[in-house]
């Protein structure tokens, strides 16, 4: 935080310091030069984080619930098929062709949501957490006339809060830091997520600085390093607030899973 308020000259000559000699908001002035674009990037990131996390939790919790049921005859087959995806992948070219040509997701916000929606590791964490829930709860609910979805919703979901919080945090972090799929599939600047928008901004600052220094023959004072620090402050704020709420569940969810 303090480095983001340093002058470019001081941070280049003396490095990062806790107490700068001179304070300046030049980096934030540059970042907020076009607040509309920054707000659009925030909106996109918040949207894909919320949608992706909620959908991912629903899908993976259902998968974990089903794979844990001993009365599901094909659970071994489907468990292997899910595990198999951790060993092999189709690669970038087939994936790109699938998303662009067959799913028509070029320049579509779902191109940033679908790739991170399901994780084999998280499904198995959910399934293994389910093993700690006594089978007698399922049996008693079945005797009372509850169906599979009712048992999942009324018994599994309340008892699986630690695993849901753990997987939900992993999902949220992944979507909040999303930039790679945006670089592949998103063309419209207003649809850029926060990380990719700021990545492009830093790349532009670096390019401008290099071009100016090459043409003028001496270094000009463009806030490159301080802008990097300001970028970290801008992006880390909202997501770090998730940790205090999920912290008490994370350890239990990971260890039991």
Image (cartoon, rainbow, N blue to C red):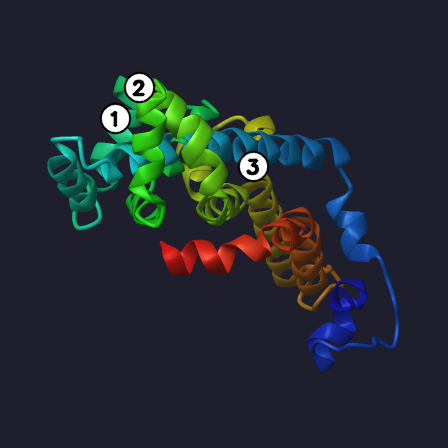
Q: Look at 36% across and 27% down and name the residue there.
A: 141
Q: Are marks 1 and 3 in contact (CB under 8 Å)?
A: no
Task: Work out which residue is located at the far bottom of the displayed protein and give it.
Answer: 14
**Residue in the foreground of this view, choosing between 217 and 189:** 189
The quarter of the picture where residue 214 lies is bottom right
The residue positioned 49% from the left and 49% from the top of the image is: 162
Task: Give the distance between the C-alpha atoms of the residues marked 3 and 2, in whole angstroms.
Answer: 21 Å
Q: Position of residue 144 (x, y in %)?
A: 36, 21
Residue 238: x and y, percent?
68, 46
Q: Earlier in the sequence, mark 2 or mark 1?
A: 1
State the separation of the CA atoms marked 2 and 1.
6 Å
> Where in the figure is residue 60, as x and y percent of width and height?
36, 36
Seen at 66% across and 67% down, the residue is 217
How packed mark 1 is, by other alpha carbons closer than 10 Å (few <14, some 14-19, many 20 or more), is few
Residues at badges 2 and 1 in contact (C-beta under 8 Å)?
Answer: yes
Which residue, given by chain and number where applicable, does mark 3 sit on?
A: 193
Q: Nearer the viewer, residue 1 or 257?
A: 257
**Residue highlighted by disc 1:** 98
Q: Secondary structure at mark 3?
A: loop
Task: Tell me, yes or no, whether the two marked residues, 3 and 2, touch with CB atoms within 8 Å.
Answer: no
**Which residue position is annotated with label 2?**
103
Label 3 crowd (10 A; few <14 / some 14-19 / many >=20):
many
The residues bearing labels 1 and 3 have C-alpha atoms spaced at a distance of 22 Å
Across the whole image, how many numbered discs are drawn on residues? 3
**Upstream in the sequence, badge 3 or badge 2?**
2
Q: Nearer the viewer, residue 7 or 66?
A: 66
Residue 213 sits in quarter: bottom right
User: If the image is split into quadrants, where does the C terminus sit?
Assistant: bottom left
């Amino acid at each position: 935080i303090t480095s983001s308020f340093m002058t470019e000259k001081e941070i280049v000559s003396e490095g990062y310091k806790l107490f700068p000699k001179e304070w300046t908001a030049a980096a934030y002035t540059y970042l907020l030069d076009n607040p509309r674009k920054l707000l659009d990037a925030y909106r996109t990131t918040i949207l894909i984080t919320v949608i992706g996390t909620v959908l991912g939790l629903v899908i993976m919790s259902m998968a974990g619930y089903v794979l844990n049921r001993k009365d599901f005859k094909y659970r071994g087959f489907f468990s292997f098929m899910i595990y198999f995806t951790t060993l092999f992948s189709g690669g970038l070219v087939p994936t790109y062709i699938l998303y662009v040509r067959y799913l028509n997701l070029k320049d579509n916000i779902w191109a940033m949501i679908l790739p991170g929606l399901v994780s084999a590791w998280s499904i198995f964490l959910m399934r293994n957490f389910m093993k700690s829930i006594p089978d007698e709860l399922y049996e008693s609910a079945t005797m009372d006339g509850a169906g599979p979805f009712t048992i999942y919703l009324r018994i599994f979901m309340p008892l699986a809060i630690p695993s849901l919080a753990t997987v939900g945090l992993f999902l949220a972090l992944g979507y909040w830091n999303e930039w790679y799929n945006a670089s592949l599939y998103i063309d419209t600047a207003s649809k850029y997520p926060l990380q990719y928008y700021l990545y492009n901004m830093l790349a532009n600052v670096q390019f401008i600085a290099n071009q100016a220094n090459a043409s003028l023959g001496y270094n000009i004072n463009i806030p490159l390093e301080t802008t990097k620090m300001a970028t970290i402050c801008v992006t880390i704020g909202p997501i770090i607030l998730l940790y205090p709420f999920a912290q008490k569940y994370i350890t239990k969810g990971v260890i039991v899973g």
